[in-house]
Image (cartoon, rainbow, N blue to C red):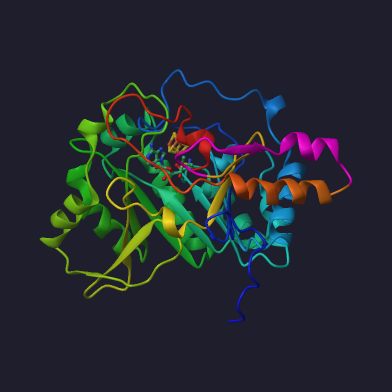
Amino acid sequence: MIADPPSQLVDRYGRQVSYLRISVTDRCDLRCVYCMTPETRFVPRAQLLTLEEIVRLGRNFVALGVNKIRITGGEPLVRKNVIRVFEQLGALEGLRELTLTTNGTQLPRFARDLVSAGVKRVNISLDSLRPERFRRITRNGELHKVLRGIDAALGAGFERVKINSVILRNRNHDEVVDLVRFAFGRGMDISFIEEMPLGMIDDHDRAEAHYPSAAIRRDLADHFELIESAERTGGPSRYYQVRGHANRIGFISPHTHNFCDSCNRVRLTATGRLLLCLGQEHSMQLRPVLRAHPLDDAPVQSAIRAAMDLKPRGHDFQLGGIPVIARHMNTTGG
Ligand code: SAM
Ligand code: SF4
């Protein structure tokens, strides 16, 4: 494979930013207990970037050396006409990878169009295989819709479909073996995620519900032989091979393994705020720059470059107490 040119986006700590995550909406058809509260209000539509503005920003990031874009949310597939964003970003020269994180409910409708638009990999969130429990965690979500979405993704021709599971003590921690078997049985990798303290929630005490990745590995060790992989993706995941299986298990452990030193990513919210760190508020508003210069991308690129100086060294998640970060994951582009 030909090496990508170095990104022009370098922060004060010498980290090259080559990965952009775009939240195309903060809205969602589910309300997972760790992500939102039942009262969570969504941003008025007038404040959202238009689809054209999202594509324009994506194009400018790619011009500056970003080679991977992940579309996320909220639930990205509930945004009207969002497929246009995939089609236009997917056609950008210089973009090596266009990916999606979704809760899966809309995949029966969109999976084939996503593949046609050039999406090669998709992450689907699934925290439980038990309908009642799934309903409880997602506040009324229907498991069978997500399972249908997974089937649609597997049938549509993506290069990789991966499962993401947020694991909470006494809510779903006893399902990790079943979730691995489910994923492996369908040829999918799976990543287990520790809950992050983003925004106030009212469902549970995050410190009490914390279930560390190390505990998951211990639970899995009774059933699988895990072999730590040296592979690093520049991201927060640590991967393990499993003897006798082709698929891998990833762990995203913000509390027990700080991944900031190799951070290569920034996030764009649905309103056009560029977040330089998942766990800090350092940011720059790009929507006013876009609207002040509708026909000239030079000021947009200058603003993006300047924002790199705001990228903090790292996050400092605390398990207990009031979260330092008020925004929830659905507005963050998790
Ligand atoms: N709605 C889509 C989904 O659920 O996949 C995309 C957006 S969602 C915010 C992205 C990922 O963030 C999901 O895998 C979800 O489980 C995870 N997530 C949400 N809130 C979280 C939190 N507080 N801590 C850790 N992961 C969280
Ligand atoms: Fe929606 Fe995803 Fe948040 Fe669940 S985690 S409420 S599916 S945005």
With respect to residue 174, does 27 lie above or below?
Answer: above
The quadrant of the picture occupied by the N terminus is bottom right
Which residue is found at the position 47% from the left and 46% from the top? 104
| Front position in the image: 6 or 248 | 6
Residue 280 included in the magenta stretch of the image = yes
The residue drawn where x is 24% and y is 32% is 207
Q: Quadrant of residue 117?
A: bottom right
Q: Which residues are magenta?
A: 277-295
Image location (x, y in percent) of residue 28: 51, 33
Q: Quadrant of ligand 2?
A: top left
Across and down, in percent, residue 92 comes to: 73, 62
Q: Position of residue 102 (x, y in %)?
A: 49, 46
Looking at the image, residue 182 lies above or below residue 23: below
Residue at the far right in the pictured view: 295
Nearer the observer, 128 or 100: 100
Image x and y of residue 53, in percent: 75, 42
Q: Residue furthest top?
A: 39
As for residue 284 lying within the magenta part, the answer is yes
Residue at x 14%, y 61% (from the top left corner): 221
For residue 235, say whether it is visible: no
Classify residue 100 as left or right of residue 192. Answer: right
